[in-house]
Amino acid sequence: MIGERIVQRVSSTRGFAKVAPHVIPALDRAVHRITRGRVLLSAQMLPGVVLTSTGARSGLPRRTPLACMPEEPGRTWILIGSNFGREGHPAWTANLLAHPDAEVSWKGADIPVTATLLTGEERAAVWKTALAFWPPYATYQARVEREIRLFRIVRR
């Protein structure tokens, strides 16, 4: 419990927001590849998936390690486009808007999914759950003017 609070406090800092986007995904991709999809380092803090989406502009496959909030593990997850509380939506969110069919690697299994951007009351309810799940999301939202995008991804 104390360790989790320390991690949450550190992850809410502006310094973390500057460094983490460059370090954590690279480490996650390397560990994920070495362990054949069974391990993500960041999943030691939060559950995680590796999203393979189609680039919105390039049309090329894009692999992005992401924290997630499982709704029905192995079937339905919530992806939160917090971008570590930095301005600008993360690129993977534009990819899902342009090409909602994607794939996630979850605990070593590659699962085809379809993404839906959450809006309105549905988004508000999920956002409330996300804040209870990982309180630093509130700090991330407070730092940016954009509304953080939430996606529900569902196994096809």
Image: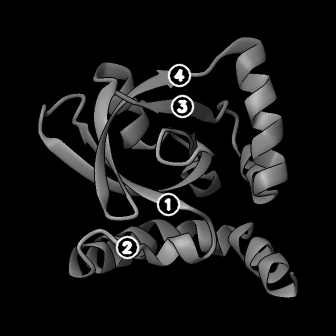
Question: Marks 1/4: CA distance?
Answer: 19 Å
Q: Is residue 56 left or right of residue 127?
A: left
Q: Which amino acid does the dot numbered 4 rest on?
A: Leu
- Which comes sooner in the sequence, label 2 or label 3? 2
* Amino acid type for the residue under numbered disc 1: Gly
Circles 1 and 3: CB distance less than 8 Å?
Answer: no
The x, y position of residue 147, in whole percent, is 67, 30
Q: Nearer the viewer, mark 1 or mark 4?
A: 1
User: What residue would you read off at disc 1?
Assistant: 48
Q: Which residue is mark 2?
A: 28
Q: CA distance from mark 3 to mark 4?
A: 5 Å
Q: Is residue 90 left or right of residue 147?
A: left
The image position of residue 96, as x and y in percent, is 36, 29
Residue 142 seen from this side:
no
Is label 3 in contact with label 4 (beta carbons under 8 Å)? yes
Q: Residue at x 70, y 34 (%)?
A: 145
Q: Position of residue 116 (x, y in %)?
A: 48, 21
N-terminal-most mark, 4 or 2: 2
Q: Which mark is residue 117?
A: 4
Q: Tell me how far mark 1 sits from mark 3, CA to CA.
A: 14 Å
User: Closer to the N terminus: mark 1 or mark 4?
Assistant: 1
Residue at the farthest bottom position: 3
